[in-house]
Amino acid sequence: MQAFPETAAAFYALRDDRTDRCVETFADGRAYQRKHIAVVIDPVRATTIAGRVLLFAVTALLARWCRIVTLVAAPSESIDRALAAMHDADPFGQFSKARSIPVDADFVLHIGGRGDADAIAIDGSGWIARVAPANAAQTPLKDAPHPLGALAAACLGVAELFRRSVGFEPLVQVRMLDLLNLGWTDTPGDAPDPTRDIGNVLLIGAGAVGSGVAYAVALCDLIGRFTVIDYDRIKIENFNRSPLCARSTHNMLKADAVVDALVASGSLAVPFHGSWDDFVRSGQLGAHRAAVWVPVANEGGVRSAVQRNFPPVAVHGSTSVNWSVNYGRHVPDIDDCFLCRFPTQAASESALACATSALPTSEGVTVDAALPFASVFASVFVAAELARRTLPSYGAAQPNFAKVDFYPAGFSIETQRRAPLSSCDCRTQLALSQLVNATSIAPVSSDTSMLG
């Protein structure tokens, strides 16, 4: 078991090492450690579902890297709850509440409402996420029961704060992300809400992205029936990229922490303590009944191994050291498979390293680099796909690949529709996949037999 650090210096040396490796080439890359950020919560937005999601997500993400945060709002149970979670994430941080913006705040983020030109404003609800200069006139977004857009907006807003904290030029344009259609948009439009029940899910990996998927599902009031596969424990090094990793969960098995979060929010979930190979050898694969597999484990070759077990539908998300987030969907006979997209082990490890990318140190030891907001953003794309699949109109029409890059000013998004390679056997495996997963294509019900 890992001993919890007794001093702030020891804690931050472990927690922030991976973040520091993402900014080590910048002139003052570690400036983020000294910044004071004020978060202003609009009183009207604070009373809505989306407003509460924005508050809890922004504060959870900020507490993973920013050591001084002031919440500017009227006293409320939600503010106290957010502060308690921040202190759990960083027991040494200076997190407080106030009725006005502190004069020494370096940056200001508005949750709803408007502010000065040099501040940032975010809003989100339903499928829509918006980040903009705080003086830009914007129509408030309508509230929605499952505000995935609010969680995405929190990621975009915190990403912009981090960019500014390490010296990047500020955002000067309004950016609105449509999670339903995977692209930027100028108007929110009207879109159907997903149903609450996202079905049976096999979550392969409970690390940064896997735990982020559970966090997104729970925070956005979605439920399902989950089997969670992982063998590792939560360490201080994990605190910078997962809202489920905190002092209260330190040294827990990751699968247990994820299961606890899912169950607490209404889902049914069971852990499997082991690797994917252990799970397959246990004989449980044929009885899991999951309609969607989410392979986000980080050990070498896991996605190739998953593909060779004929997943019914696979959805994944990941990040890389070059400030980008990747999303992928793999529906048999429609999309490319993992072996099409990542034909070699080297390509798989370099292009799709879940939540991290490995960097060698001067001593030759390999460690992971990770931005503290990117894993949750990758998880939002996965959760959005799980939610999209509940829509009556769903037909896999959206792109099956998306890459969001946080590096350029205003961010960027690239999407593609990738078809199976003519040289890959997956073109002939649809019938076999349906046979192997015959029980998973039935309508989702309240049956819990997948949980044993």
Image (cartoon, rainbow, N blue to C red):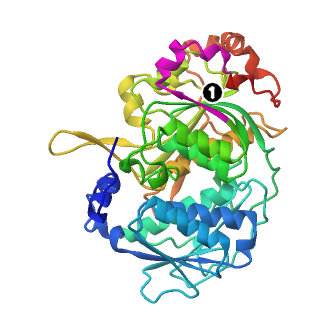
Q: Amino acid at mark 1?
A: Asp
Disc 1: which residue: 335
Instruction: Say left or right for 185 vs 19.
Output: right
**Residue 143 coordinates in the image, percent (x, y):** 78, 63
Instruction: Say left or right for 80 vs 440.
Output: left
Quarter that holds the N terminus: top left
Residue at x 53% of width, y 19% of height: 279
Q: Say if 73 sits above or below 7 in the image.
A: below
Residue at x 34% of width, y 53% of height: 4
Residue 181 shown in magenta: no
Residue at x 70% of width, y 73% of height: 46
Quarter that holds the C terminus: top right
Q: Say if 253 sits above or below 10 in the image.
A: above
**Residue 306 coordinates in the image, percent (x, y):** 53, 21
Residue 431 shows up from this direction: yes
Residue 410 shows up from this direction: no
- Closer-to-camera residue (247/220): 247
**Residue 262 coordinates in the image, percent (x, y):** 64, 43
Instruction: Say left or right for 202 vs 93.
Output: right
Residue at x 51% of width, y 42% of height: 209
- Closer-to-camera residue (86/222): 86
Secondary-structure class at tag 1: loop
Q: Residues within 10 Å of mark 1 (few under 14, many from 20)?
A: many
Q: Which residues are magenta?
A: 269-288
**Residue 121 coordinates in the image, percent (x, y):** 60, 73
Determine the image quadrant of residue 81: bottom right
